[in-house]
Image: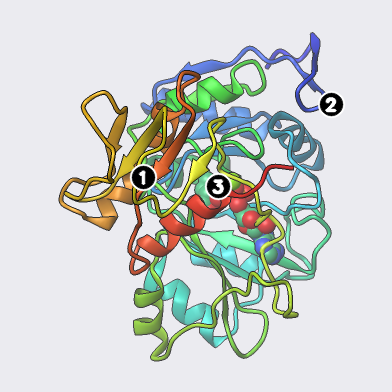
Amino acid sequence: MDINQTSANPDLGGIHPYRDTVRIVPDSAGLERAGALLRSGGLVGFPTETVYGLGADATQATAIAALYAAKGRPQFNPLIAHIATLAQARAEGIFNATALKLAERFWPGPLTLVVPRQPDGTVCDLACAGLASIGLRLPSHPIARYLIAKAGRPIAAPSANRSGHISPTTPDHVWDDLNTRIDAVLEGYASPVGVESTIIACLEDRPVILRHGGITREMIADCLGHPIAEPDHTGNSNKPLAPGMLDSHYAPNAKVRLEAQSVGMGEAVLLLGPDKPAGMDETTPRLNLSPRGDLTEAAANLYAYLRRLDRPDISGIAVMPIPDHDLGAAINDRLRRAAAPRP
Ligand code: TXA
Ligand code: MG
């Protein structure tokens, strides 16, 4: 890892060390190399089934500090620790009966559980942003699992984008955002789920969903035998929220307009299904998340299509209504944040 040079980071107002970013083919030699980079405190982008993650050794505070700097992420925002087995998860967090039930049903897979930290857990305070709880996730992606097992310790991995930007679903997306800021990117295929993991807090008797994601509320209700408590975005409740759920997030440069029934002058359109908004003609830039209206396919395409429509020559992105069931809940959540007023 070459961190000799430093370069100012004008858009984020901070300093991040220059790094020679390499692209690594995830064969056995490549995974060995990536695992060694992580153990030595390096920053490695890698594929998961949800989005690409930016991995760092969760037990090394210096590696975690470098990760926050590379992303330009506020340090009060805790990271998810990725683990390879349920036993490893239980060494870091205290699982109540509900947490265990959810882990057994949905791991490996796109679910993060927020549980109380084990007093003798190995994840550093900085990765947990000093909280008494920890977010744990056991991904199903074979490259991710192999890499975490190779590293031999919990791997903190936020989405591999600069803070506030659109999450990456391909190695090229990671490269575009983080080249010269991280040590390596493992070159896998496009992430199949396409939106981040669902986050559920199991801190009290009643579990609470903190972020919609790859495991749908319908699947969770089926597992628990009752609907799960939903997040409250009004700010009027004392329910916990993931601190990272800042209002503006996942944002392209272009202005995003939701529930569009018609296209405005110069706007690009994000479609779902066969319907078209009024005023759309053959000159309107457009992409269809899923021409047959399939929400799973739409989630997989969401971030890549937002990036592709985000061109300097458009006046904004008009998004057609998305049904709010199944993966539509996660899609709508991300779109609301992309459309939120920017700070
Ligand atoms: O699918 C995913 O979860 C991806 C892939 C790479 O695994 N990771 C991801 O990480 O989305 P990130 O850092 O972009 O989002 C993590 C979210 C943040 O909103 C953070 O506030 C929340 O998880 N979080 C982490 N630990 C928490 C805790 N102890 N309590 C509440 N929220 C927590
Ligand atoms: Mg993120």
Q: Is residue 167 left or right of residue 58?
A: left
Report how far apart the C-alphas of labels 1 and 2 lie in the structure: 35 Å
Please name which of the two marks, 1 or 2, marks the residue nearer to the observer.
2
Report how far apart the C-alphas of labels 1 and 3 lie in the structure: 34 Å
Q: Residue at x 79, y 8 (%)?
A: 5
**Frontmost residue, 327 versus 149:** 327
Residue 276 showing in the rendered view: yes
Rendered location of residue 48, percent (x, y):
43, 44
Rendered location of residue 201, percent (x, y):
61, 74
Residue type at mark 1 is Pro
Query: Which corner quadrant holds the C terminus?
Result: top right
Rendered location of residue 102, percent (x, y):
46, 76
Q: In this view, does 288 lie to the left or right of 104?
A: left
Quadrant for ligand 1 reads bottom right
Residue type at mark 2 is Gly
Q: Which residue, given by chain and number where applicable, does mark 3 sit on? A: 339
Residue 163 vs 112, above or below: the answer is: above
Residue 263 vs 139, above or below: the answer is: above
Q: Which residue is drawn at 43% across and 50% down?
A: 195
Tag shown at residue 14:
2
